[in-house]
Image (tube, helix red, strand yellow):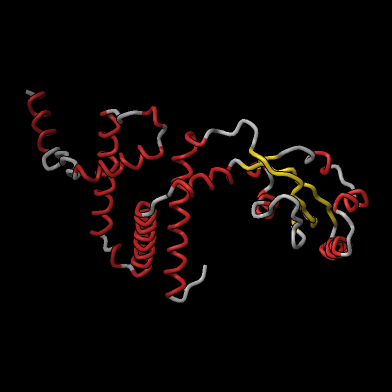
């Protein structure tokens, strides 16, 4: 009898505490998350396992539940939260527009080959370093008066001159030096001192060639295509922003 009374009491106590079913999640939302994951996963990853889809659906359902609670509390009416939401929304659509633009562009064979040559380019870089920009500019005057770059190197030797004696891929140079060397051709000397590592450098391209053991054109073709399309998208966006009074 006592057991029946206890059972009845527990039944009454638990009345109204039944666990609600998790909110249903639109399949398209789950697919969108899985697509994003697939884009960053290695090619050999293959199709996502069924348990991953279930985990994504559960996470989205949890987000919806918490969102609904936030709305019940009126958090969506708070000015600072509305401002944050507008910023997030604007950033989201800006990213979507950039992706749409990149996908709409094409990359021709000549563009691809030129980009491949640039990406696998190696240079034999000669350089002379100075403690200040003023010293570098004074040395530049010596070059303008006829002193050869090789003679200038002898006047101002540094250990890195030996290290750069061979061909070095542009991609392996420090970004500041690579950016300065990229548009230069064989025999050219930098028009102005290049700031790097707390010093100022005059550069000369002694020779150019292809990086040793560089990947083949076919191996890099997809990557280069993506980079070209993204560059065109950035240029188009810059034009659009400039037309609307914004220079970034």
Quarter location, residue 85 = bottom left
Name the residue located 83 percent from the left edge and 53 percent from the top edge: 129
Q: x and y percent of residue 134 in the render?
A: 85, 66
Q: Nearer the viewer, residue 124 or 7?
A: 124
Q: x and y percent of residue 17 in the render?
A: 15, 41
Kindly give the residue lying farthest to the front in the view shown: 110
Q: Is residue 95 above or below residue 170?
A: below
Q: x and y percent of residue 236 in the render?
A: 43, 63
Classify residue 28 as left or right of residue 210. left
Classify residue 82 as left or right of residue 127. left
Name the residue located 65 percent from the left edge and 51 percent from the top edge: 182
Classify residue 232 as left or right of residue 92. right
Q: Nearer the viewer, residue 21 or 60?
A: 60
Q: x and y percent of residue 195 in the render?
A: 75, 58
Name the residue located 48 percent from the left edge and 46 percent from the top edge: 112
Marker count (numbered):
0
Quadrant location, the N terminus: top left
Q: Is residue 214 above or below residue 171?
A: above
Q: Is residue 245 above or below residue 191?
A: below
Q: Is residue 85 above or below residue 156?
A: below
Name the residue located 75 percent from the left edge and 51 percent from the top edge: 187
Q: Nearer the viewer, residue 45 or 135?
A: 135
Kindly give the residue lying farthest to the right in the view shown: 155
Quarter location, residue 148 = bottom right
């Amino acid at each position: 009898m006592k057991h029946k009374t206890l059972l009845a009491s527990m039944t009454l106590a638990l009345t109204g505490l039944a666990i609600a079913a998790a909110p249903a999640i639109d399949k398209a939302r789950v697919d969108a998350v899985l697509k994003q994951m697939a884009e960053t996963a290695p090619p050999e990853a293959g199709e996502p396992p069924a348990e991953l889809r279930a985990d994504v659906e559960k996470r989205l359902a949890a987000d919806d539940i918490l969102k609904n609670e936030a709305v019940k509390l009126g958090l969506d009416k708070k000015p600072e939260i509305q401002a944050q939401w507008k910023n997030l929304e604007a950033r989201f659509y800006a990213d979507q527009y950039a992706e749409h633009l990149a996908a709409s562009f094409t990359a021709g064979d000549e563009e691809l080959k030129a980009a491949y040559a640039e990406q696998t380019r190696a240079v034999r870089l000669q350089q002379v370093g100075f403690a200040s920009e003023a010293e570098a500019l004074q040395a530049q005057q010596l070059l303008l008066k006829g002193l050869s770059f090789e003679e200038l190197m002898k006047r101002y030797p540094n250990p890195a001159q030996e290290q750069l004696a061979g061909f070095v891929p542009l991609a392996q140079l420090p970004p500041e030096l690579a950016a300065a060397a990229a548009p230069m051709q064989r025999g050219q000397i930098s028009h102005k001192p290049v700031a790097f590592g707390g010093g100022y450098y005059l550069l000369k391209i002694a020779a150019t060639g292809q990086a040793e053991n560089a990947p083949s054109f076919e191996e890099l073709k997809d990557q280069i295509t993506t980079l070209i399309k993204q560059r065109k998208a950035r240029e188009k966006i810059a034009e659009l922003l400039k037309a609307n009074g914004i220079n970034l």
